[in-house]
Image (cartoon, rainbow, N blue to C red):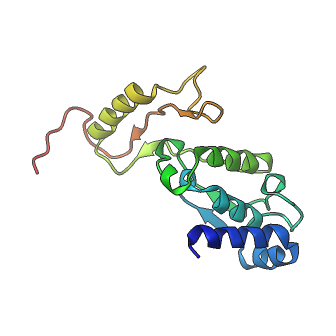
Amino acid sequence: VDQVDLLLELRDLLRDRPDVRGEYQALFEHVFVDELQDTDPLQAEIVLFLCEAGARASTWREVTLVPGKLTVVGDPKQSIYRFRRADVAVYANLREIVQRGPHLVSRLTASFRSHPSLVVWLNTRFDEVLGRAGPGKPAFDPRAGTVANEPLVAGLPGKEGPRVVVL
C-alpha cells in the first residue's frame, strides 16, 4: 500500500462508520492545518470528518464543524503541489465549509521575514505577474482558479529603497 491507499482507507472508515468517526473525533480537541492550499481532496475529507459536530454527515460536503475545533492557514498564491494531488479548489471548498459556521478570520498582511526593500520588490513583481487585488478583482476567485496579489507591508525596520547584497 502507498500513501494514497492509506488515505483512502482512513477516509472510507471515517465516512462509512459513524461509530468509529465519533471515537476518532473524541481524540482531538483541536486540529491545526498549515499550508491548507497544499491539501489534497482525501486529506481535506479526513480533516472535515474529524472536526465535525457529531458523526452525522454522509459526505464531507454536509459536515457541520464544531466551533473552534479547526484552525486553517493557507495562501492560494502558494498552491504549487498539483503534482501530489493538491488542488486550490479543495482550498476553496474547505474555506466555504468553515465560513458556513461561526468563524474568525485573521488576515496576515505583513512580512517580518524579509528586508523592506525586498518586500517592495516582490510586491511589484507579483502585481505584474498576477495583477493586483482590489475593487472588482478579488484576491482569490475559485471559479476562475485565479489569484491576484495582495501586497504585503514590510514588518521589519529599514529603508524601502534599493539594496545590494554581496554573497
Most extreme residue toward the top is 136
Instruction: Left or right? Give the position of 144 relative to 161.
Output: right
Who's the residue at 51% across and 57% down the image?
A: 84
Residue 34 found in image quarter = bottom right
Who's the residue at 56% across and 54% down the image?
A: 85
**154 up-or-down from 84: above or below:** above
The total of numbered circles placed on residues is 0
Instruction: Left or right? Give the position of 49 relative to 6.
Output: right
Most extreme residue toward the front is 1
Residue 27 found in image quarter = bottom right
Most extreme residue toward the right is 56
Who's the residue at 79% across and 62% down the image?
A: 66
Instruction: Left or right? Give the position of 122 relative to 58.
Output: left
Residue 132, how many percent across, how many down? 47, 26
Instruction: Left or right? Give the position of 71 relative to 103.
Output: left
Residue 114, how many percent across, how many down? 31, 47
Please state, as top left, top right, bottom left or bottom right, where the N terminus lies in the image: bottom right
**114 up-or-down from 126: above or below:** below
Residue 37, how many percent across, how many down? 55, 50
Residue 61, how many percent across, how many down? 80, 52
